Amino acid sequence: MSIVHFVGAGPGDVELITLKGYRKLSQADVVIYAGSLVNPDLLQYCKEGAEIHDSASMHLMEIIDVMEEAVKAGKDVVRLQTGDFSIYGSIREQTEEMKKRGIEFDCIPGVSSFLGAASSIGTEYTVPEVSQSVIITRMAGRTPVPERESLRSYAQHRTSMAIFLSVQGIEKVVAELVEGGYPIETPVAVIYKATWPDERKVFGTLETIAEKVKEAKIRKTALILVGDFLGEEFYYSKLYHEDFHHEFRKGLSSHAK
């Protein structure tokens, strides 16, 4: 029997799908894609005659029904999801239902939008001696967030943070972060549709970012990046320091005094 391949589509740029993901997509007989989030230009990789379903208008059981019918007919299926499905991808509910019906699957990871956003502004989340941790989270909305995972509770760590699915409530996000412990001058970047052709970037601080986001008319499909990793302070890593020796680099550098 055929199987279902969960494929991370990448953050938006059609060239940021993995080679393995591209190969599975190009060979699939049936493709179910998240039309509200996935760049539709990725469908140009599908073979002629492939059966394509937009899951934006489908409920969970309709999606599983399509998968079951296809695999029983011996067809290969790709479930194409935005970014990497392991972050806010709703994959668990799909795989649990698939297991009940004996539908086999595998998973091909993709590039998450929080990685695409960092690349778009040419930065790293883990700047030596500034921040060595990244918190990936969201503000509570129609999907609740456990109280122990509130923005306010995370803010006390003042580490790098990538906040998904929350730009529509940017004022509340700012208030929670400040009340939790981030200084008002903490730098912030809001990246709308990272790596897409119509990507936009807004920079500011916790004091100014809400107004700037309003002025830019950004209301959805954006990541909020917060932390001193965006600031001017940085330190070189020890790994490439000329006096730092390890198993692959021994002895004094020619530049060492």
Image (tube, grey):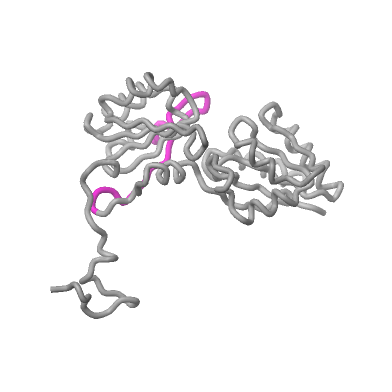
**Which stretch appears magenta?**
129-149
Q: Quadrant of residue 12?
A: top right
Q: Is residue 144 found inside the magenta-colored segment of the image?
A: yes
Residue 232 horizontal/vertical position (percent): 22, 43
Q: Residue at x 60, y 36 (%)?
A: 39
The N terminus sits in image quarter: bottom right
Q: Depth check: 91 or 76 in front?
A: 76
Question: Is residue 79 left or right of 128 when viewed as pictured?
Answer: right
Residue 169, relative to residue 90: is it above or below? Answer: above
Residue 99 horizontal/vertical position (percent): 72, 47
Q: Depth check: 182 or 79 in front?
A: 79
Q: Residue at x 33, y 77 (%)?
A: 247
Residue 125 horizontal/vertical position (percent): 35, 47
Residue 26, relative to residue 200: is it above or below? Answer: below
Q: Residue at x 28, y 31 (%)?
A: 180
Question: Is residue 110 left or right of 164 when viewed as pictured?
Answer: right
Residue 60 horizontal/vertical position (percent): 69, 33
Question: Is residue 193 left or right of 44 when viewed as pictured?
Answer: left
Q: Residue at x 53, y 38 (%)?
A: 88
Q: Depth check: 148 or 98 in front?
A: 98
Question: Is residue 243 left or right of 194 when viewed as pictured?
Answer: left
Farthest bottom residue? Answer: 251
Q: Quadrant of residue 91?
A: top right
Q: Depth check: 49 or 6 in front?
A: 49
Residue 136, relative to residue 128: is it above or below? Answer: above
The C terminus sits in image quarter: bottom left
Q: Is residue 248 found inside the magenta-colored segment of the image?
A: no
Q: Main secondary structure of the magenta part?
A: loop
